[in-house]
Image: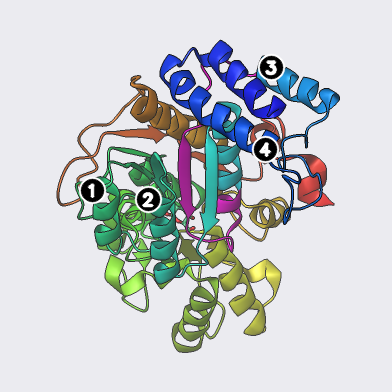
Amino acid sequence: MKRQLFCVIIIFMKTRLTVIFIILIPVLMCMGCAHSGGKDDNAGKAPSAPGYGADAYTESEIEGLASVYEGRDEGAIPAKRVGVAMPTKTSERWINDGMSIKARLETLGYEVDLQYADDDIELQVSQIESMIRNEADCLVISSIDSTRLVDVLKKAKDNGISVIAYDRLLMDTDAVSYYASFDNKKVGTLIGEFISDQMKLKEASESGRSYTIEFFMGSPDDNNALFLYKGLMEVLKPYLDDGTLVCRSGRTSFYETCILRWSEDTAQGKCSELIKEYYQNGDLDIACSAFDGFAYGILKAWKNAGFAEDSLPLITGQDAEKNAIRNIAEGRQGMTIYKDTRILAAKCVTMVQALLENSEPEINDTFQYNNNVLTVPAYLCDPVIIDEDNYEEILIGGGYYTKEQLFQ
Ligand code: BGC
């Protein structure tokens, strides 16, 4: 009885919920009567464990309990929940993205459910469904296939849950409030400009010199891949048109060169086929790849064809993965695109706050990202070219990697 009365008094003192007090007092009085009337109140219950029986709490336990109540913020409300759905752990960047978002949200006091879906669309759908069941207040989603979440996103909307598209735009839905990403078209432009500078395409064009090139583009179910292709072709198409760049396979369109699910193995297979059919002498000058993972596949295909490292084509990439930086430092890969996932995560978190706390997130694009239903307000971070000349200054100097992480 001592315990129940104590708790009621504490609740009354702390919350001043008079209604609860009025309701509980008679109930507890009855319990007290029952208690004093019975000989063994604990019969059939665990022996004297806290929470069982009227005298289960000792004086010192009650004092402990009181101090817990004392330490509590009077206005404390349960933390809001954020579900974070990431596509895969096979590529380093998503691991970094997930960790950065989770850490930032937790620092702000949110409860975070971070899930990776192994590039399995059904698994991602069921992870998001479970976040909805667990009453998430907001969802941050980086899709595997941007068009296959329409139904589950509708469920989220019907349950009043806000959604942010993270890095990859969610297509064909009105259930998305904001989009946090990089300037995906610029990623392509930067890759194109790097190739153009390295191979001196302008001079080559003027002097009638030509180079061979093949393309390894991103996944057709990822809107970013198409944007990248468009930016890339703005730079390279004139050189394809005037014959400065020669693509022996003739595959230059996005749909002829895209690689489903950004698969390194598929890129390796495609590169082996191209070598066998068009470049038996190892005379491919440029392997224009949209992802570091493809660059690894191209390197393997080159090696498996029996060609020496010093005859490698100029290989491009994206994501500034540790392996890619090693390859750049050692001359096997020409460049990559650095996307600082810490900045992207920070921008995304301001969007979560805006949706949950009625604040205003920073938006810098309101026209580029139409998902076939609406134009999603976006914050686009700046991608940066990384090559052998600047990786130390930007990646190590900027604290993204330590030297040991890169070269141990
Ligand atoms: C991202 C790239 C990444 C690719 C493969 C794209 O959606 O924008 O940064 O390389 O997915 O994971």
In this rendering, the label closer to the viewer, 1 or 3: 3
Q: Earlier in the sequence, mark 4 or mark 3?
A: 4
In this rendering, the label closer to the viewer, 1 or 2: 1
The residue nearer to you, when weighing 105 against 33, is 33
The residue nearer to you, when weighing 247 against 187, is 187
Going 62% across and 58% down the picture, which residue do you hit? 333
| SS category of the residue bearing label 2 | loop
Within the magenta stretch, is there residue 308? no
Disc 3: CA contacts within 10 A as few (<14), some (14-19) or many (>=20): few
Q: Earlier in the sequence, mark 1 or mark 3?
A: 3
The quadrant in which the N terminus is found is top right
Q: Is mark 3 within 8 Å of ligand 1?
A: no
Q: CA–CA distance between discs 1 and 3?
A: 38 Å
Residue of label 4: 37
Residue 340 point in image, percent of width and height:
55, 38
Residue 303 in view, yes or no = yes
Residue 373 point in image, percent of width and height:
14, 49
Q: Amino acid at mark 3?
A: Gly
Q: CA–CA distance between discs 3 and 2?
A: 43 Å
Residue 145 point in image, percent of width and height:
35, 63
Residue of label 1: 158
